[in-house]
Amino acid sequence: MKALHFGAGNIGRGFIGLLLSQAGYEVIFSDVNDTLVELLQERKSYTVRLANEAQETFTVSGVTAINGKHVDEVAEAVAQADLVTTAVGVNILKHIAGGIAKGIELRIERGAAPLHIIACENAIGGSTQLKEHVYALLGEELRTKADAAVAFPDAAVDRIVPIQHNEDPLQVTVEPFYEWVVDESQMMEGFPRIAGIHYVKHLEPYIERKLFTVNTGHCSAAYLGYLQGYATIQEAMAHSPIASLVRHVMQETGSLLIQKHGFDLAQHEIYIDKILQRFKNPYLIDEVARVGRSPIRKLSVNDRLVRPALQAYELGMSPTYLAMAMAAAFLFEDQGDTEAVEIQADLRDIGITQAITKYTTIGEEHPIHQLILTHYEQFKQTAIS
Ligand SMILES: NC(=O)c1ccc[n+]([C@@H]2O[C@H](COP(=O)([O-])OP(=O)(O)OC[C@H]3O[C@@H](n4cnc5c(N)ncnc54)[C@H](O)[C@@H]3O)[C@@H](O)[C@H]2O)c1
Ligand SMILES: O=P(O)(O)OC[C@@H](O)[C@@H](O)[C@H](O)[C@H](O)CO
């Protein structure tokens, strides 16, 4: 069985490639990074090390790669695959849609078996977004045929994999914890289950719990850590006022999740505690720049900050800690991050009031807008204590 995985990066090699290989798939990576592609083609294996005391190491073998810049090669790999997965970044999905659309066309011409395409990105409805990009490239007749031949089940993936600075560019160090949840209600009948994946009939509680707890807390630690001058999440979380604020943010989203999805309060507290421990993992060095990356995406209406804040507000809560995290996001500067640079340019050109509305969609008349503004002004005057 062949799995074609787009994105031989940290989560691609450190989680999806490893799990699919252990489940018996021959994994073919598609990436646009020539070094990664050439090394995978040459060595056909790489190692994954767990970030714990034992530093257990796994060798993932029987893998190879294709260059994602060669669309015809990508299409042929899609045509021959038994499963397609992605971990490229949600904003990159539109760039891989062309090869996938061509591959689907080839599958239909050849009468190939049905295919599942699973986007493993940090986003609500990642596979559905990919489907929209792919379908926009198919004519009406092909779309109808694709409906019967291809499914795009949404997923939630969780495993912290920092940016790697290893001598061997293929080696990847990952936290021991992992969770991969797939919406089986979007799958086709009779598709074989993959060991290690948790299949659920209704994904929303799982993706919201993950995105609004792990990722909301994580970016809060990054933005607050940045304000205090820390370079890593581990350093930021060792500063107890930051760790306490991050817990408050997660408790705020926790109140929403408990009310909306009926999670058990005590179980959710355990979930939060475990995540706080994961952020502090002393065997990982996770850069604030990575976790805070793409602040425009993170401040967008369907992502980890604004979506839970608006939902909490609708349920009668005042999301003050989420507003604080958003305010900190507006102060995040990184010359290497085009989205951070763009926000800072806008702050100079249009000011914070208009920037809040532009990036979060939350208008000036909304109480959350005022909360963000207040925290923003406070952060500009005083350090976190
Ligand atoms: N790292 C984590 O802890 C983690 C955990 C869960 C989910 N995720 C999600 O997984 C996705 C990838 O994150 P990452 O940390 O692995 O990033 P990464 O930058 O390490 O990996 C992304 C890879 O995609 C490749 N890529 C870019 N454009 C491409 C294209 N057109 N075709 C094929 N490959 C292309 C890049 O070269 C890179 O190797 C993101 O959506 C992220 O939110 C990351
Ligand atoms: O990948 P992003 O930019 O959406 O978010 C950065 C981190 O919070 C994220 O990669 C986590 O490490 C991961 O989601 C843990 O499962």
Image: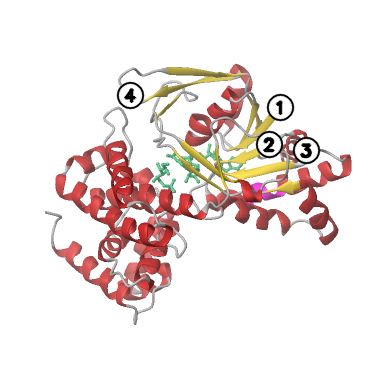
Q: Pointer 3: what residue? A: 79
The Cα atoms of the two marked residues, 3 and 2, are separated by: 10 Å
* Tag 1: amino acid: Met
Q: Mark 2 near mark 1, Cβ–Cβ under 8 Å?
A: yes
Q: Where is residue 135 in the image (x, y as percent from the top left)?
A: 72, 57
- What's the magenta bit mostly, secondary-structure-wise? helix
Q: On the image, which quarter does residue 368 sit in?
A: bottom left
- Residue at 74% of width from left, 47% of height from top? 150
Give the numbered dot on residue 52.
4
- 227 versus 175 height, above or below: below
The Cα atoms of the two marked residues, 2 and 1, are separated by: 8 Å
The Cα atoms of the two marked residues, 4 and 1, are separated by: 32 Å
Closer mark to the observer between disc 4 and disc 3: 4
Q: What element carries label 4?
A: loop
Farthest residue to the bottom: give it: 365
* Tag 2: amino acid: Leu
Could you tell which of marks 3 and 1 lies nearer the N-terminus? 1
Q: Where is residue 186 in the image (x, y as percent from the top left)?
A: 65, 50
Q: Mark 4 near mark 1, Cβ–Cβ under 8 Å?
A: no
Give the numbered dot on residue 83.
2
Q: Pointer 1: what residue? A: 1
Q: Is mark 3 on a helix, strand or loop?
A: helix
The Cα atoms of the two marked residues, 3 and 1, are separated by: 13 Å
Closer mark to the observer between disc 3 and disc 2: 2
Q: Where is residue 379 in the image (x, y as percent from the top left)?
A: 19, 62
The Cα atoms of the two marked residues, 4 and 2, are separated by: 31 Å
- What crowding class fits label 1: few (fewer than 14 Cα within 10 Å), some (14-19), or many (20 or more)? few
